[in-house]
Amino acid sequence: MNLAIVKYNAGNIRSVLYALERIGKEAVVTDDPAEIKAADKVIFPGVGEASTAMGYLKERGLDELIRGLKQPVLGICLGMQLLCSYSEENDTDCLGIFENQVRRFDGAGLKVPQIGWNNVFGLRSPFFDGVPEQSYCYFVHGYYAALGVDTIASSDYGLVYSSGLQKGNFYGVQFHPEKSAQVGERILTNFIEKI
Amino acid sequence: MLTKRIIPCLDIKDGRTVKGVNFENIRDAGDPVELGALYAQEGADELVFLDIAATNEQRKTLRKLVNRIAHHINIPFTVGGGITSVDDVSLLLQNGADKISVNTSAFKRPELVSELAKEFGSQCVVLAIDTKREEDGQWYVYLNGGRVKTEMLCADWAREGVSRGAGEILLTSMNNDGTKKGFALDITKELAGSLTVPVIASGGGGTKEHFVDVLGEGKADAALAASIFHFKEIGIPELKGYLQEHNITVRI
């Protein structure tokens, strides 16, 4: 199994690598197009700001590269949001794999960003095998992907939104599996072994 | 439903965990990586590592320590101490930190908060504020680990920090820190009830009731403590069980 983690200017790239190491999986962190294309599976992580991240991807042609990938791809947090069509965060056009729009949380009395452990429910896809409904995962985000046809997991923070998305070979999770203790480790293992 | 968080804090000096009383009389409390991994296993929701004696020389040591922590624990952690620039933060994040906290340097140059939020997103920028209630009854901001008083009111600085993009406020009451007599409920409640970002209450947690008070009445989103965990006075599973019994939502 040849795993590639897309290297770009968005935060927790290494955290994902270390989480994979803890579950006994090796990966390379790379922005080399040939290496990403050749990988069996690609993880597209990220914590950060949408317009800065998209700008970086475009400068390096990584936007087109990611859009064209045929193998299973997992977007995490900002990575998932960048796979959506558009983000309100600095009015950013994203990669457009998922039709969902990314909006800012703005409910009355709601703390933004949402930071902490929240439940995931409505789980579908083998991606969540062995993960009980209402499991706690770790979230850190001020923007959310609205519900849509590609939603495979939901969470509730003032409103119900997509905490998991899937369309064809593209998967995305809003929470951080690499920081979600045993539940997260199970999800990463599923992506590698069951997808 | 989003849970309240329990956050053990590890103050680091020369690569060891230490705990001061009222920011002085530093005591040794062990290897930070070992402690951090233990807390993660016991159900801590996050960890905070504060390098309390950060100098240029020690910064490199801190990065190595951050890297070791990132390898060993499977929950999020924040790193603070001596951060003055976007480059400092970039290095810490590259070494596996999830969030960073800024304190004195942000007060001296508030643009730092704006720059960090723009570059990395608000969600990884924690503004730490050390505050003390003076005889006039007002809470003032203190700098340099509590050694330097300012004329700025805590609530004013917190609001400015949030408007510049801080994603979280780590509020330490110097009046309460190290006393184990309970958190500062009034200032915590004032900030947690008025700010649009989460507030982590710190300083004074000594009993399980104190945590119920600060997460309930004090409206804090998270509670941070050090010595009661380091010296095994209260176990995290025991604390979380107690919070749940008192209708505070926690991850168990």
Image: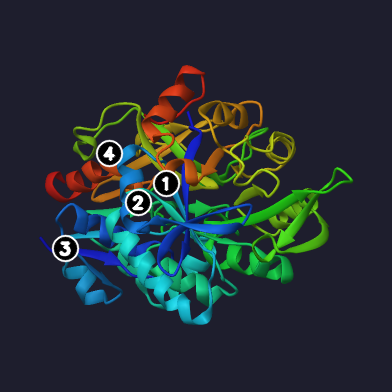
Q: Are marks 4 and 1 on the same chain?
A: no
- Mark 2 residue crowding within 10 angstroms, few (<14) / some (14–19) / many (20+): some
Determine the CA span between mark 3 and mark 2: 26 Å
Determine the CA span between mark 2 and mark 4: 22 Å
- Mark 1 residue crowding within 10 angstroms, few (<14) / some (14–19) / many (20+): many
Residue B163 image point, x, y percent: 72, 55
**Under tag 1, what secondary structure?**
helix
Residue A7 image point, x, y percent: 34, 70
Determine the CA span between mark 4 and mark 1: 26 Å
* Relative height, residue B102 to residue A121 (above, below): below
Let me know if residue A43 appears in the view.
no
Depth-wise, is mark 4 or mark 1 nearer the camera? 1
Q: Residue at x 24, y 36 (%)?
A: A128
Residue B192 image point, x, y percent: 68, 38
Mark 4 belongs to which amino acid?
Val
Q: Could you tell me which chain the residue with mark 4 belongs to?
A: A
Q: Are marks 4 and 1 in contact (CB under 8 Å)?
A: no
Front in this rendered view, residue B53 or A52: B53
Task: Check residue B230 in the rendering and tell me which mark sits there, or answer none.
Answer: 1
Q: Are marks 3 and 1 on the same chain?
A: no
Q: Which residue is mark 3?
A: A26
Q: Are marks 2 and 1 in contact (CB under 8 Å)?
A: yes
Q: Could you tell me which chain the residue with mark 2 belongs to?
A: B
* Residue A126 left/right relative to A93: left
Q: Which residue is mark 4?
A: A183
Q: Could you tell me which chain the residue with mark 1 belongs to?
A: B
* Relative height, residue A89 to residue B176 (above, below): below
